[in-house]
Image: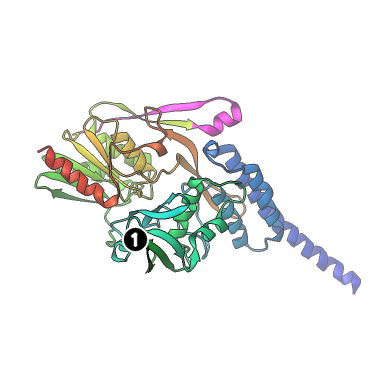
Amino acid sequence: MKKALVPSLFMVGTFMAISQNKYQKDFDYFWELMEDQYAYFDQKQTQWNKVKELYNSRLQTIKKDWEFTFTIELMKHELYDPHLSLNRNLDFSFRLIPNDSDAYIKVDNEKYYISDIRDSYRITEYNLQIGDQLVKVNGKNIQEIIHSNLPTSIENPDEEVREYFANLIFAGRHNEPRKFDILRNKQSIEVQVPRATPIKESSLLLESDIVLGDVGYIKINNSLGNNELINMFPKVVDDLKNTRALIIDLRETHGGGNTDVAKAIMGQFITQEIPYQIHERVGVERALGIKRKYIEILSPLKNPYSKPVYVLVSRWTGSVGEAIAQGFSNMDKATVIGTSMARLLGAIKCVTLPDSGLNVCFPFEKLYNIDGTPREDFQPDIQTRNYKQTFQKTLELIREKK
């Protein structure tokens, strides 16, 4: 009997070793990928070496693929970067921000307030207002929830870290309701809202209209990654060529996009080449000591629009949407109006971990405006208090210029 057990024990031991090696290989691959190529360590409180030490110990207890996914997800949150994402989520994962958020939470003196509401979402149908203090989520104190989710590698998390987790918590987990206790004018109010849902679902890449009788309006419906927009957008602009001004609404472009679409939009409003943005490959300098930094050029397209252009942005203008707004700010005819944007860091690349197939997208390039301002620090030419006010303010400005 003892002899018969030997092969079985050997097979079990071999299986466990293979399983652990599988996770260890991808764990090391992910950690080294970030170590070598993640572009924004200099802006983070994260101690990346400590992250490796802390989470490597978890691998010894991992038996299932979802546990490994959860480990990588926790490591991702150590960087508190909404532009770092995975192609898989678990039932209890936080929803993506800004994609799946319908309000923006800010920290003020250790308290958490709703500073903006996504006016095109159903959250407007519920009793929540800008200025409300967030006290509890699903019956638990917001301070306690944030504390339990803070990165383990950071000793004294600053407001940026806390704000990131406050917005994750407000967006909610996939398998949990969203019940909030808020404080308004010293009165406690309980509000339950569904997951972030648009008031109007649209399959259109963009929508256009005439407002104020002679002003063109184009709304981009989170389609900056769809190459069909490259041919569609110039045609719509041409249809509006006789208007006295044009509004381009980028307030719902949370999903980012690609540079070709961005250039097809901006190229419709210039008559000669202009600098667009500055790229910096941080990983190259980290590995070789050679700075890789270059200026990207924007080229004109046929039949450019010659009248004033107003570009609307919001907390839900993300990534390529932010780059487009920044690009328009360098044109004399354009005015960017709105709040701070999503402040998504840099340009991303996506890499698949070899064994698990988990796909990781992360910022590998820093991006700057042509004046050297980091894209995430860009502010609109005319700043508004919130999403809703941006459109109203734009109409006021156009009326004044008539």
**Horizontal relation, residue 307 to residue 81: left or right:** left
Instruction: Specify start and end residues of the magenta stretch as a single range.
Output: 281-302
- Residue at the image position 75 percent from the left and 57 percent from the top: 17
When the figure is inspected, residue 47 is found, relative to residue 130, above or below; the finding is above
Kind of residue indicated by mark 1: Asn
48 up-or-down from 300: above or below? below
Residue depicted at 35% across the width and 43% down the height? 340
In the depicted view, which residue is nearer to us: 187 or 44? 187
Is residue 357 among what the camera can see?
Answer: no
Q: Is residue 14 visible?
A: yes
Q: Which of the 4 image quadrants contains residue 113?
A: bottom left
**Furthest residue to the front?**
186
Q: Is residue 156 above or below residue 122?
A: above
Whether residue 180 is situated above or below residue 357 in the rendered picture: below
Q: Which residue does the image show at 16% across and 35% down from the upper left? A: 307
Give percent across and percent down for residue 24.
68, 52
Please state if 131 lies on the left or on the right of 176 as rendered: left
Front residue of 155/120: it is 155
Residue matched to label 1:
185
Q: Position of residue 103 (x, y in %)?
A: 37, 56
Residue 275: in magenta span: no
